[in-house]
Image: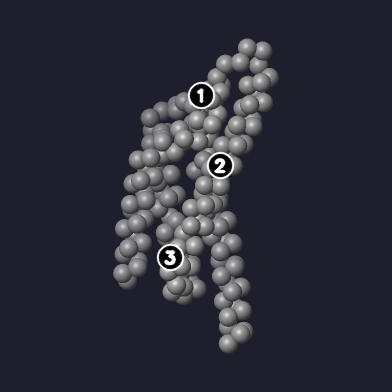
Amino acid sequence: MKTKSLIGIISIFLFFIGFNNYQNFVKFFLDFIPELAIAYDTLWAQVLQSLFFGLLLSIIPILSLILWIKFKIQQNKIKIYIILLFLVSSIVASVSRTLILKWIYQRAFNAMPQPKPLMYEAENLNYNVYIFLSEIITFILLYFILKKNQKQRVENH
């Protein structure tokens, strides 16, 4: 029960961190694409993007807890590795999205006779979609890896 409460508190904490820092997160990654100018259609769209980012960060401890309970993981070292894998997959997804955007817009920018910054709707950046997919893929991979390891442990005993 203590672990579940701690996970709940961490999830809430991560939600607020994600919600408050989404714009900094996007600015950090988009600074690598100077020819791309970002605009939001509405303030509500900006709030929704921040909300979704906060939710994505808050589900990392919850998905980790599901794996810990399902496979009865007691070792803190393995628990930390699971959380780190979720975080690394989210970072990889963000970097890959930035590289894809850079590749697309560098080609368009270079094709212009008189290059100027390209406007892009921030709602279509899809960082949240990439991060969500990376978390789900990581969860599924960890599930099958841990399931295979559990079967091997049972067969060895």
Reply above or below: 36 against 135. Answer: above
Q: Amino acid at mark 3?
A: Leu
**Residue 75, placed above or below residue 83:** below
Asked which secondary structure carries label 1, the reply is strand
C-alpha distance separating marks 3 and 1: 39 Å
Q: CA distance from mark 2 to mark 1?
A: 18 Å
Asked if the residues shown at circle 3 and circle 2 are in contact, with their CB atoms under 8 angstroms apart, the answer is no
- The residue at which mark 3 appears reads as 65
Q: Position of residue 110 (x, y in %)?
A: 66, 21
How has the structure been colored for display? Answer: one colour
Question: Residue shown at 50%/30% (left/top)?
Answer: 31
- Residue 80 position in % (x across, y down): 45, 63
The kind of residue tagged 2 is Val
The three-letter amino acid code for the residue at tag 1 is Ala
Q: Which circle, 3 or 2, is nearer the viewer?
A: 2
Residue 55: image location, x then y, percent: 41, 49
Q: Nearer the viewer, residue 102 or 38?
A: 102
Q: Earlier in the sequence, mark 3 or mark 1?
A: 1
Left or right of residue 123: residue 154: right
Tell me the residue at 45%/33% (across/down). Answer: 27
Let me know if residue 2 appears in the view.
yes
Tag 1 residue: 37
Q: Residue 64's mark? A: none
Q: Secondary structure at mark 2?
A: helix
